[in-house]
Amino acid sequence: MIEALVVLGILSIVGAGTAALLVSQQKTTAQIQKKIEVNSVASEVEMYLSQAETCRNLFQGVSFPLPASVPSLPYTLPANQKISLSNLSYQGSAVAQTGQVRNGIIVNKIEFNQIVDNTLSATAPHRRFILNFVMGFEFPGQGQPALRDKNYRVMVEIDGSNALVSCRVADSDQMALMCSDLGGTYDASQTPPCYIPPTYQ
């Protein structure tokens, strides 16, 4: 009788431990799936940003009232100058929307928040900038772990009324090529990274 009770006790402990392990595994799997969804959204947005036509369509109608001069680079835009968006859409189809739950994650931020470079030449009254575009993500519900923001460097050209003329994600290779085309020298360790001699400006 005692041996039977001991066996039952051991089995109950083992069963409780197995159940706890399964619950933990399920939570871990759910978090991994949500992080995969974050990467999926981020990759989709990067795909649109990588081509001039799709990038321009993604931000169609967005105004870029950027300051003509800044004290230093990179320059973080004050809260009242950040270009915050409530959604992204491509040809009428939703790509991302703040506050909306999508496969267990919420997009909580879509904005241009920093001027990385404002020294690129453009034919007046057009202006060219390299901006930091950021998307923020979170799990729904209180007390959930934070998710890292996804940042993209985007080259934008705007006209005299601050309307978007063209844009494209600016990785280091693209930035170096663009800088060279403008008669400059590119050095990622410098601020700004593209130095254009006065004769080219």
Image: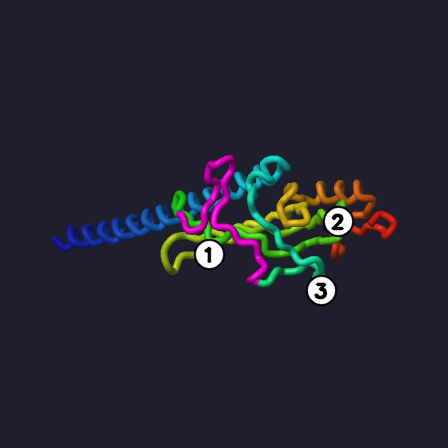
**Residue at image point 53% right, 39% down:** 44
Query: What amino acid is labelled 2 in the image?
Result: Leu
Q: Name the residue that disc number 3 marks.
A: 71
Q: Earlier in the sequence, mark 3 or mark 2?
A: 3
Give the residue furthest to the right.
199
Disc 3 secondary structure class: loop
Residue sitting nearer the eye, 136 or 86: 86
**Amino acid type indicated by mark 3:** Pro
Q: CA distance from mark 2 to mark 1?
A: 36 Å
Magenta highlight range: 79-100
In this image, 31 relative to 125: left or right?
Answer: left
Q: Please name whichever residue, 8 or 121, is drawn nearer the observer in this view of the structure.
A: 121
Secondary structure under badge 2?
loop
Q: Is residue 47 left or right of residue 98?
A: right
* Residue hosting label 2: 120
Q: Residue at x 77, y 48 (%)?
A: 121
Q: Position of residue 165 (x, y in %)?
A: 65, 42
Secondary structure, mark 1, is loop
